[in-house]
Image (cartoon, coloured by chain):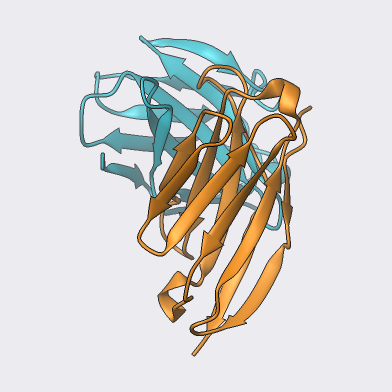
Chain colours: A cyan, B orange
Amino acid sequence: EPEVTQTPSHQVTQMGQEVILRCVPISNHLYFYWYRQILGQKVEFLVSFYNNEISEKSEIFDDQFSVERPDGSNFTLKIRSTKLEDSAMYFCAIGTPRTYEQYFGPGTRLTVT
Amino acid sequence: ILNVEQSPQSLHVQEGDSTNFTCSFPSSNFYALHWYRWETAKSPEALFVMTLNGDEKKKGRISATLNTKEGYSYLYIKGSQPEDSATYLCALDSGGYQKVTFGIGTKLQVIP
């Protein structure tokens, strides 16, 4: 099973600050996803990324969010100006569309104060 | 917005009991269905991906069935063990692997 790591495991930031969450898949995958889970709510899809482009994004993924693969390995999610309601667990996943499987990282808990 | 429902939301069973829970989804939006097992402080672990009506998958004591026509999937655990305690998530893949809609999960606690 492919391994995915995420850093940091927990980030605390002040409202209005920029945060960058990192995902490092330990394998060669082309499909990447970000999800989040606000405490007590469902896991929500944010964005999918293929071949260095966004392939689909949800209504949550507004102009405050961006994703990139700056060096061909790390996959990052940036939130430009965090809001209190961005506090959540953020999961990165890698995909193998041929088998429809997605493998999740351990998540980054973001706390916005 | 697609609605993926899971029931029950939480469940306590005695060690050795068998149990099952349900995931229901809009049948018109089906492409694939995922089941994940999620232990606290760990990554969601992929259990099954199911694509065909009537699919049955098995992994050890855990199995799942799928009915795409009526829009539901069952997850069964035979002879529950304390290590089965986790939240079991189902997720509907409705757009060819691009976008996945999750249910709220069923939190299972197995009492020794």
Q: Position of residue A76 (x, y in %)?
A: 40, 29
Q: Outermost residue toward the front? A: B54
Q: Outermost residue toward the bottom? A: B112
Frontmost residue, A51 versus A22: A51
Frontmost residue, A87 versus B20: B20
Judge from the rendering whether residue B81 lies leftward or rightward of residue A69; answer left or right: right
Image point 47% across, 28% down: which residue?
A: A33
Whether residue A11 can be seen here: no
Judge from the rendering whether residue B103 lies leftward or rightward of residue B14; answer left or right: right
Judge from the rendering whether residue A99 lies leftward or rightward of residue B34; answer left or right: left
Image point 58% across, 23% down: which residue?
A: B31
Q: Outermost residue toward the left? A: A27
Q: Is residue B59 above or below residue B51?
A: below
Quadrant holding the N terminus of chain A = top left
Say which quarter of the image contains residue A31.
top left
Q: Position of residue A17 (x, y in %)?
A: 58, 37
Disc tally is 0
Image point 40% across, 33% down: which residue?
A: A101
Say which quarter of the image contains residue B91.
top right
Q: Is residue B13 above or below residue B34?
A: below
Q: Position of residue A44 (x, y in %)?
A: 64, 38
Image point 41% across, 25% down: which residue?
A: A32
Q: Is residue A13 above or below residue A83?
A: below
Q: Is residue B74 above or below residue A64?
A: below
Q: Position of residue A3 (x, y in %)?
A: 26, 43
Whether residue B12 can be seen here: yes
Frontmost residue, B88 versus A60: B88
Frontmost residue, A26 versus B52: B52
